[in-house]
Amino acid sequence: MELTQATVNDLLTQLGPGDGYTYLPGDLDPQDLTDLLDSRYGAARTLVLDGFTDPTVDESRGAALLVPFEDRAVTIRAWACGDQWVGTGTARDAEGAARPVLVVAHREVPEPLAVAPDADEDVDWVDWMERLRRITGWTQPAQRPDVDWAEVESRLGTTLPSDYKRMVETFGTGAFDGYLDLNQEPWTDLRQDGLLIWAGTEHEDLYCWRADGDDPDRWPVVVRSFDNKDVPFDCQAAEFVCRILTEPHHPFTMARYFDTHWFMNYRESD
């Protein structure tokens, strides 16, 4: 079997959106499939290694992927992708032979509750970064927790929105759905137009803030489209990403192209 991303797509389609698994040809190198899935979904979580299951594995960490194999899993690595778990590795078949496998399982993605920003306020607000973590199935530890924002902001001459800083710290270098690239610090190419660029796409759309006012957490998102038009949105960056991932009628939607969503981390997996 020749392994390509197209092959992976076909295999996942055959397994369907629910729970399913398949044994793969014995001459297939499981590491090749792991590498392809790593490049798509980011670094994997190891559930089983050399027949030993990680004792911390539970429903929130992909335990559903192990159900079909009972105690026959040899090595299983897992990725969370929206409302689906995807796993690969090796497991013993009915004859006891270790064979490559691909397995999927449904993943519960609870809607995050609105939380009150201040005990003295009655208005609830949504933690859009938490919602974004759940939409993308992100279970990895923070990728860049030690960013020196004081240095970045001093160099840029402005403080930056807190949700954006959380995005960079949480996800690190990469792209939502392998498409929307998250800048690790804002680009200043459009500063003469009052815009700072926090993300972009291969279609040359630039995702910016209108950097007006002293409170960056109130800066609205502006999309500078490939044809040089500005489209404003009255929301912050994390909310904007959540909406384009999930709302099929949003003018910059990605929901029409992907049923589940992920963050493709560009760092090499451990």
Image (cartoon, helix red, strand yellow):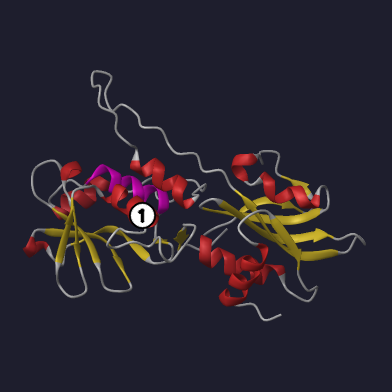
The front one of 236 and 168 is 236
Q: Position of residue 64 (x, y in %)?
A: 68, 46
Between 248 and 269, the one nearer to me in the picture: 248
Residue 201 visible in the picture: yes
Give the quadrant of the C terminus. bottom right
**Left or right for 219, reference 181:** left
For the view shown, which residue lies furthest in the front direction? 249
Q: What residue is shown at x 8% (from left), y 49% (from top)?
A: 212
Answer with the quarter of the image where residue 9 lies.
bottom right
What residue sits 38% from the left and 56% below the top?
245
Whether residue 270 sits left or right of residue 174 in the image: it is right
Asked whether 164 falls inside the magenta stretch, the response is yes
Total number of numbered discs in the rendering: 1
Q: Which residues are magenta?
A: 161-171
Based on the picture, tell me whether residue 160 belongs to the magenta stretch: no
Q: Pinpoint residue 183: horizontal percent, then vertical percent.
A: 30, 60
Q: Give the percent coordinates (x, y) of residue 221.
A: 20, 54
Q: Residue furthest right?
A: 95
Residue at the image position 75 percent from the left and 64 percent from the top: 22
Q: Quadrant location of the N terminus?
A: bottom right
Quadrant in which residue 30 is drawn: bottom right
Residue holding disc 1? 247
- As helix, strand or loop, the secondary structure at mark 1 comes to loop
Whether residue 85 sits left or right of residue 29 in the image: it is left
Q: Vertically, is 122 above or below 268?
A: above
Q: Is residue 76 above or below residue 131?
A: below
Q: How many other residues sit within 10 Å of disc 1, few (<14), some (14-19) or many (≥20)?
A: some
Residue 73 percent across, percent down from the top left = 79, 53
Q: In this rendered view, identify the residue nearer to me: 55 or 239.
A: 239
Amino acid at dot 1: Glu
The majority secondary structure of the magenta stretch comes to helix
